[in-house]
Image: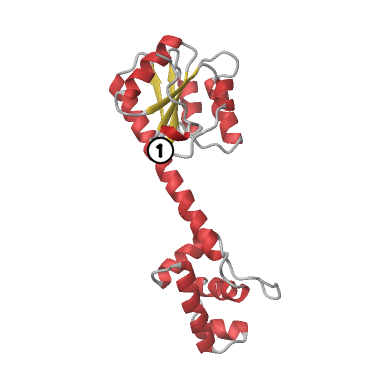
Amino acid sequence: MSERPKSSRDPAAGDDPVVFIVDDDPSMRRSLTNLLRTVGLRVEALGSAQEMLRCELPDQPSCMVLDIRLPGLSGLDLQVDLAKANVHIPIIFITGHGDIPMTVRAMKGGAVDFLTKPFRDQDLLDAVAAAIERDRKRRDSEKSLADMRARFETLTPREREVLALVASGLMNKQVAAELGLAEITVKLYRGQIMRKMRARSLADLVRMAETLGIRPAKPGVQT
């Protein structure tokens, strides 16, 4: 049986979470692959950090089980390179030679866990489950933000002005005075904004504005 199962780049592989194993020890890769498959996870087993850097990440929740000591680029260096490339795959470090400085560096870099060999199977499975859940939440949050930005792009320039002022805490009559509009016109704009942004309440709309970093234009500056 091939050590690497169906590639995560294969469309037929489905949308199940993917675990990348990066370890230069073939027996460890086989052992971890078999363990993770027992809980229904798809696995990509790689022998070096360079292979991981060349690998196309799947568009679904994933994580990496990464050995600290690797030929060429180390696991810790790979963590840094991925962060620089804005790749946010959660990492679980494994090592037979762990020490406190390594552990601190890994965890400060955002690692989910740091396991010293030999570790219990359940400890690894628990760490992988936590890592996949973290990645799933990140993806959901990014999708929600992208959807919110797309809705904001549908607003007219005037609606964006009104949104910024409303979100800053001004009442309708104050917004009207600020923009030289009738108060009823501001109310109409506000209703259109609520509908386009799919805001359930004013508080919801204010939260969206804060998330998007919307602020009123400075006096004399066109929005």
Q: Which residue was labeled with disc 1?
A: 15
Q: In this rendered view, identify the residue nearer to me: 85 or 169.
A: 85
Q: Amino acid at mark 1?
A: Asp
Where in the figure is residue 39, as x and y percent of width and height?
A: 30, 27
Q: Quadrant of residue 176?
A: bottom right
For the residue labelled by badge 1, is the local secondary structure a helix, a strand or a loop?
loop
Say if 203 sits above or below 91 in the image. Answer: below
Q: Quadrant of residue 81?
A: top right
- Residue at 34% in and 24% down: 36
Say if 181 sits above or below 204 in the image. Answer: below
Where in the figure is residue 107, as x and y percent of width and height?
A: 46, 30
Say if 25 sits above or below 17 in the image. Answer: above
Where in the figure is residue 138, as x and y percent of width and height?
A: 44, 44
- Residue at 49% in and 76% down: 192
Where in the figure is residue 32, as x and y percent of width and height?
A: 37, 18
Protein image colouring: secondary structure
Q: Residues within 10 Å of mark 1 (few under 14, many from 20)?
A: few
